[in-house]
Image (cartoon, rainbow, N blue to C red):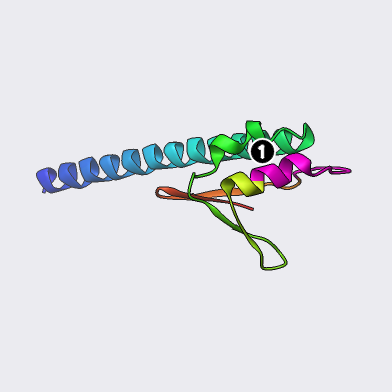
Amino acid sequence: MKRDLTLCFLGLVLFVSAALAQAQETAGTERTVATLEQKWVQGVKANNPDLFAPLLADKIVITNDDGSVQNKAEWLANMKAAKFDSVALDNLKVTAFGDTAIAT
């Protein structure tokens, strides 16, 4: 009986330890993604797409609101030519799910 309780307690400790480690990893991922989102906004504010270009995959395809499609180079050129009156990142929420994070 004592052995069974000891094994149950050990299993519980291992389970809680694993859950805490995963929670810490998730929090770190969410902080990293939030930092990258801030870097993106800084690049747009400074009208400097070179700040956020490394965040985009080389094979990315951008679909604009009018349905037109651009590759990375075309989109970055458009961003460089664009002028924004204001840029803000409000109420950012990042949620990590395993190896995927969603920023809203």
Q: Is residue 48 magenta?
A: no
Q: Is residue 101 left or right of residue 86?
A: left
Q: Is residue 87 magenta?
A: yes
Which residue does the image show at 84% across and 42% down from the upper left?
A: 83
Q: Residue furthest right?
A: 85
Decide: is 41 above or below 94: above
Q: Type of residue at label 1?
A: Trp
Provide the residue designation for mark 1: 40
**Residue in the foreground of this view, choosing between 8 and 99:** 99
Q: Residue furthest bottom?
A: 67
How crowded pointer 1 is (Cα within 10 Å; few <14, some 14-19, many 20+) is rated as many
Which residue does the image show at 67% across and 68% down from the upper left?
A: 67
Residue 13 percent location from the top left of the image: 28, 40
Residue 39 percent location from the top left of the image: 65, 33
**Residue in the foreground of this view, choosing between 12 and 83:** 83
Residue 44 figure quarter: top right
**Residue in the foreground of this view, choosing between 46 and 97:** 46
Q: Is residue 73 left or right of residue 90?
A: left
Residue 57 percent location from the top left of the image: 49, 45
Residue 24 percent location from the top left of the image: 45, 36
Q: Is residue 19 left or right of residue 10?
A: right
Q: Which residues are magenta?
A: 76-89
Which residue does the image show at 64% across and 31% down from the upper left?
A: 51
Q: How many marks?
A: 1
Dot 1 falls on a residue whose secondary structure is helix
